[in-house]
Amino acid sequence: MTIAIPSLDLDCGATLAPVDIAYESWGELNSARSNAILILHAFSGDSHAAGHGGWWEAMIGPGRAFDTNRYFIVCSNVLGGCRGTTGPGSKNPATGKPYAMQFPVITVGDMVRLQARLADQLGVGKWLAVAGGSMGGMQALEWAVAYPERVASAIVIAATAKHSAQQIAFNEVGRQAIVADPDWCGGNYYGQALPARGLAVARMVGHITYMSDASMREKFGRRLRGKDAFGFDFSVDFEVESYLRYRGSQFVERFDANSYLYITKAMDYFDLSAGRRSLAEVFAEAKTRFLILSFTSDWLYPTYQSIEIVTALRRWNGDVAFCELSSSYGHDAFLVDTREQAEIVTGFLARTSESLR
Amino acid sequence: MTIAIPSLDLDCGATLAPVDIAYESWGELNSARSNAILILHAFSGDSHAAGHGGWWEAMIGPGRAFDTNRYFIVCSNVLGGCRGTTGPGSKNPATGKPYAMQFPVITVGDMVRLQARLADQLGVGKWLAVAGGSMGGMQALEWAVAYPERVASAIVIAATAKHSAQQIAFNEVGRQAIVADPDWCGGNYYGQALPARGLAVARMVGHITYMSDASMREKFGRRLRGKDAFGFDFSVDFEVESYLRYRGSQFVERFDANSYLYITKAMDYFDLSAGRRSLAEVFAEAKTRFLILSFTSDWLYPTYQSIEIVTALRRWNGDVAFCELSSSYGHDAFLVDTREQAEIVTGFLARTSESLR
């Protein structure tokens, strides 16, 4: 489904008009409108969270943690993306051509402001929960702070209250790989050759950061690809090289390079405590119940970043549950190692529902 | 200094002829020829280890750990590099043009075999010590295994007995960034535009892996560069972005992109236990004293890789000292956080000298 919003004011000061927002939903909104859950996707995700091929299929469905028999589940594509919601590849009404780099620089706050407009349209005054991993968790935090009255609970997985220098650095490398590609053409590549090589390199870096040293060792080790001995050339020697090249080239088929630039920038700008004296101050008005999860082997969004959030909430005696889950899958764990995560989310949602009765 | 070797047999089966090897030395070889130390440089290092601007200036000099008043210190540029020793940018005698991708794929074993020829020329039958960090440590290990009679001691810092999938992956991203640059031209860019953008991106990835999350936070945090507020554009916002872009562009001035390809490949091929049942077996004949050092915050060459070496040596009751040094500097620690390292090396070299008397 796609709905159109006449205009949206952005943190940069610009106004975007009109704005499309594409979403999917599962289950039914109850008559009390008290069972709605907003799922927030990560950097390269989209609204297809559940159902066949959904990125959180293991978490969402009948009888699953986000139980579609009990809850009304919504997931929308983020602002700035390339899957239906307005982004740099969308037509700029002022020119009739794709925005490209005329698209305004957006923030996580802008993404959430647009989602609030979607909630209005869907008749959801208050979410039972907003939930996501990675950038999805950042959006969940932003929701709880920007709209405390509209969020009964927030499930924040493998996320952070602000991007660190290292997280910014990895994103910057990806951006530089894209803009270094001559086919990027200052962003005006729509309808012609795509900056496929730059985008593939950016994605390769990403994939390394999503896995852990241990999971790469388990999955690839030093196994050679289709040969018994080193080739002594620069074709593929190792399985891991083949995997990265494949993942890079595959990504180009489904993702827009300019969206890569804009969304990573939004993540880097994200700092929940910006303009305040401390992160604790951010949560002074919070009425939301929080579930914060991290994973032992996630070195891209390390546990200490989750603990910073928990500590800030505890200052106000905030309602927060925190677990560091054991997994060797690195940052990918919230997508692929979901058993324990699902159990904890199930219980958390049940308790949240009870507390609202 | 540069000396010429008529020919060198390589692990790939090819023979390289002729081969130049460029080196520097400090101090004097004693009459017993028992005070020679070979310093082995890391990936992007060179023979200028000591003296003004030397990459290990803090470690090498009069009264320092590698005391030039006591020891005869030698450091050569690696095979495949771009600082005087034969590499892909050198003239191919068969064509009169640079080798470019006609250069044979080389190994750490080949690098060390060439260094052994240098030792012959210098009249050094046996090194008091071979020492290096990162790829330098890999060469030190190779020396001890390939020439056990010629190495009294090996100092192996922030290194590994074999590259892991993650280490291969980071190198592969760098290689792909280079070959994706249209200016790379299949390696035939000499005398024309260099693949500067690809090489810069490769270097940016490298710099992230050389630092730690903590050292990036201390050095950059979320500080903005030359502005008080976000620019809401894609110029530099954060200090860390500026740093990476600067380091990337600076690297292009001093390093050859094809050397990047060849040397990273040699590192990825490195596996001391290849063709044997275990790493322990490798050291069955070892007569060398080992000093193995790692750093707490080094996530590129983590401590467990050093412990693998120590464990293998212990199987044979090998003479090995191991320390994990505390540092927040990540992999760069062996270059920049040298105080404790220097103390330990000083003692280790003194004991090694005594044991030879």
Image (spheres, coloured by chain):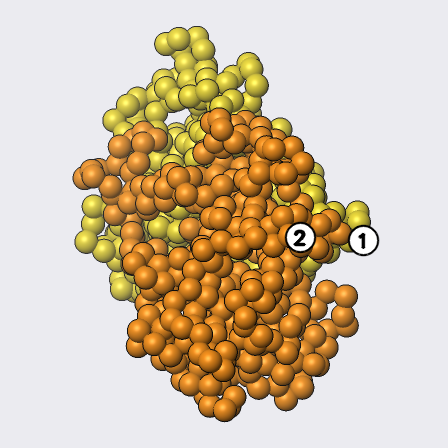
Chain colours: A orange, B yellow
The residue that appears at 70% across and 55% down in the rendered structure is A9
Q: Is residue A47 left or right of residue A151?
A: left
Residue B189 in view here: yes
Left or right for B267, reference A105: left
**Nearer the camera: disc 1 or disc 2:** 2
> What residue sits right under mark 1 in the picture?
B228
Expressed as whole percent of the image width and height from the top left, the position of residue A108 reads 61, 59
| Residue drawn at x 53%, y 75% as measured from the top left | A127
Marks 1 and 2 belong to one chain: no
Relative vertical location of residue A215 with respect to residue A20 in this rendering, above or below: below
* Mark 1 touches mark 2? (CB < 8 Å): no
Q: Position of residue B131 (x, y in %)?
A: 48, 47
Q: Callout 2: residue from which chain?
A: A
Q: Is residue A264 above or below residue A98?
A: below
Q: Which mark is residue A47?
A: none
Q: Secondary structure at mark 1?
A: loop
The residue beneath circle 2 is A7
Q: Circle 2 sits in a helix, a strand or a loop, which is it?
A: loop
The amino acid sitting under disc 2 is Ser
Q: Chain of mark 1?
A: B
Task: Give the x, y percent position of residue A208.
Answer: 43, 51
Which three-letter amino acid code belongs to the residue tagged 1?
A: Asp
Task: Residue at 36%, 51% (x, y): give it.
Answer: B164
Q: Between B247 and A12, which is closer to the camera in this rendering? A: A12
Q: Residues within 10 Å of mark 1 (few under 14, many from 20)?
A: few
Q: Which residue is located at x 67 percent, y 78 percent? A: A283
Viewer-nearest residue: B214 or B302: B214
Does B73 sit above or below residue A142?
above
The Cα–Cα distance between marks 1 and 2, rounded to whole angstroms, is 28 Å
Q: Tell me if residue B140 can be seen.
A: no
